[in-house]
Image (cartoon, helix red, strand yellow):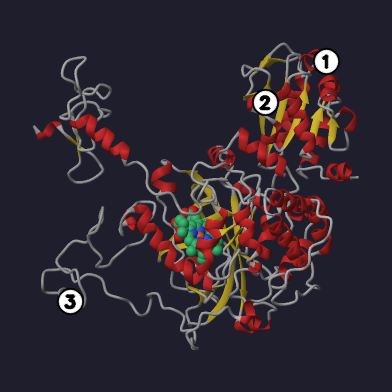
Amino acid sequence: MTDDFELSDGGANHQKPRGDDDVMTTAQGHPIADDQNWLTAGPRGPQLLEDHIAREKIFHFDHERIPERVVHARGYGIHGHFELKKAIPQYSRAAVFNEEGVKTPTFTRFSTVAGNKGSPDLARDVRGFATKFYTQEGNWDLVGNNIPVFFIQDAIKFPDLIHAVKPAPDRGFPQAQSAHDNFWDFITLTPEAMHMVMWQMSDRTIPRSFRFMEGFGVHTFRLVNAEGKSHFVKFHWKPKQGLQSVVWNEALKVNGMDPDFHRRDMWDAVDAGDFPQWDLGIQVFDEEFAESFEFDVLDATKIIPEEQIPVEIIGTLTLDANVDNFFAETEQVAFCTQNIVPGIDHSDDPLLQGRNFSYLDTQLKRLGGPNFTHLPINAPKCPVRHFQQDGHMAMSNPKGRANYEPNSWGEGTGEERGPRACPMNGFQSYPAQVSGPKVRVRSETFADHYSQARQFYISQTPVEQTHMANALTFELSKVERMDIRKRMVGHLRHIDDGLAQEVADGLGLTELPDKVPAARDPITDLPESPALSIIKNGPGNFKGRKLGIYIAEGADADVVKGLKDAATAAGGMVEIVAPHVAGAKLSDGKMMEADEKIDGGPSVTYDAVAVVMSDASAKRYNTDKPSIDFVNDAFAHAKFVAYVPAVKPLFETAGVWNWMDDGFVDVSSGKDAVSDFIEKCGKLRFWDRESVKQD
Ligand code: HDE
């Protein structure tokens, strides 16, 4: 009888039923004859509880959800690897930093912070950037964000911050938004948040894609070398794709059009083999620098400008495999800031220290027991040996008799003695001097709240500064209480009077509110840091970006082909949009298939657009709302637009024909014009259009 059963590769006692490989079974392995009809007493009679197949199916379904993350609930994970390009034994003994060319497997999860699991991707929000490195010496989790500072300085304030930004407890809204009273009430009573708020109100919080944003470890960490010498370090992820964000009006529309915009973009890019990459950079400094720096390096509301301590690139992260199962991998991955390896250590940053408690605690709640390290996505890829045992869902249990230490099993006893601690290679905490009275105070060295907020603001291009003023005005306009609006403007006056005035004007305040009392007068002459601007750090080419070509019946086939070829040759992706999803017949009489019907492929989903139609089609669609929006939004969002003169009737009703600027390129003349267009697209947006509108 047993000969008829095939052993599965899953484990010693796991067998498959006779017959075909794809026979459905219960979780207990019973082959199922009918999975669609509950056992009943007679065809129209009551259902029987005896039906173990139906009951198991429903029981399991009832328990499908685990608690979503209390913050960063909405996220997207991708596998990859980190390749070390430059060994740094002088700073760290960590294996991951010592052998050039070695590839360490990784899992990275990007996320938004405030929204729940089903919230839209383009909320104005900080993005999480968490990477688990499965190193030879155990897992190292770098749990960072796309912004290098944080709202608060001490972890004990985190629940207040998160309560304030999440939906109000009485009404249960607004979802995934900071534009409401509770958030701004908390922020304006928390001056330490001002630097972070400047980043939050910048385009950093509406990234075009996860692929086009930076990542930061935020805190100061330590690197410790083989001699036990320590340096401080800050970690940076620099996207090889360059930086890019959307504009706010576009973000709002993307959310309606495609709430999964970011995860879809990542899935599509990885699926297409266009693997995104980030360089890992380190800013290394010693105690002496820390002492001389204007701000406290343990204060997570401060950066160290790259112009002051350069970022040294030491390796590259490549994200090259989508998950097989979202729940098993992205949902169950458990990042813990306390997962560090020998050669990396914590600093006394009070935000980091609090996080080291919180993450382990949160995983216990989310994953239901202490054995979440047994799940494949969390399990280290190096040997694991210890005397921990049992607990919920224990899957990898040690063999043998010894489950304690010290023990005297081992040689000659016929039993394994089990693992032993290793003082030479094991993790050693850096023996930093610690002394002082037990107190609940904030260090005086954390008291400057405005200087770097100002530095961030003055480092932006005028376009980005305008976006910040608009974002602040938008958010504060959603705040109902006048005193909160004014209080925020009172803070802005410490940052930049011009910005304060612009926001006051935007809010319709007749008088500029008084400055909020400052714990310390800001330093006003910190130099600009170009590294802080997105526009100054764009890619300069169209690689990895998407061109949407809107075609209709009779469109010039050569022009469409020319655009497709040129965009693809530049490393871009192309999608064809048409009035019907079947596509359109071009001037050569051939049918070109569409990727999207016009109302499913609005211009907000593309980095640049082209509209190629015959005169007859342009007349036919010049009252079609999705067609008008396609053109009008592309204009309003400062996109580059390729066109042929025949589209005039549509461009006229879209209101752009008389406003066409250098961001519009007539590509009817062929190859040169098309190349000119694609080259321009490398700038991503024609920002001059925004300033023209303001005049
Ligand atoms: Fe987190 N944070 N955090 N955080 N955080 C969590 O852990 C927490 C902070 C960050 O993709 C939680 O697994 C406290 C800073 C990311 O799974 C929780 C404080 C930074 C992720 C938690 C902070 C982060 C989390 C919720 C104040 C940037 C998502 C679910 C000291 C450096 C990781 C979970 C993923 C997740 C606590 C502040 C980044 C509750 C107490 C600063 C990217 O443990």
**Foreground pick, 251 / 101:** 251
Q: Residue at x 45, y 68 (%)?
A: 356
- Residue 544 visible at all: yes
Q: Amino acid at mark 2?
A: Ile
Can you say whether 254 is above or below 436 in the image?
above
Characterize the local packing of mark 3: few (<14), some (14-19) or many (20 or more) Cα atoms within 10 angstroms.
few
User: Which of the numbered marks, if any, corresponds to residue 407?
Assistant: 3
Q: Residue at x 48, y 72 (%)?
A: 353
Give the mark toward the camera: 1 or 3.
Answer: 1
> Residue 243: x percent and y percent?
69, 51
Give the mark toward the camera: 1 or 2.
Answer: 1
Q: Amino acid at mark 3?
A: Asn
Choose top left, top right, bottom left or bottom right for residue 600. top right
Name which of mark 2 and mark 3 comes first in the sequence: 3
User: Which of the numbered marks, if any, corresponds to residue 576?
Assistant: 2
Choose top left, top right, bottom left or bottom right for residue 526. bottom right
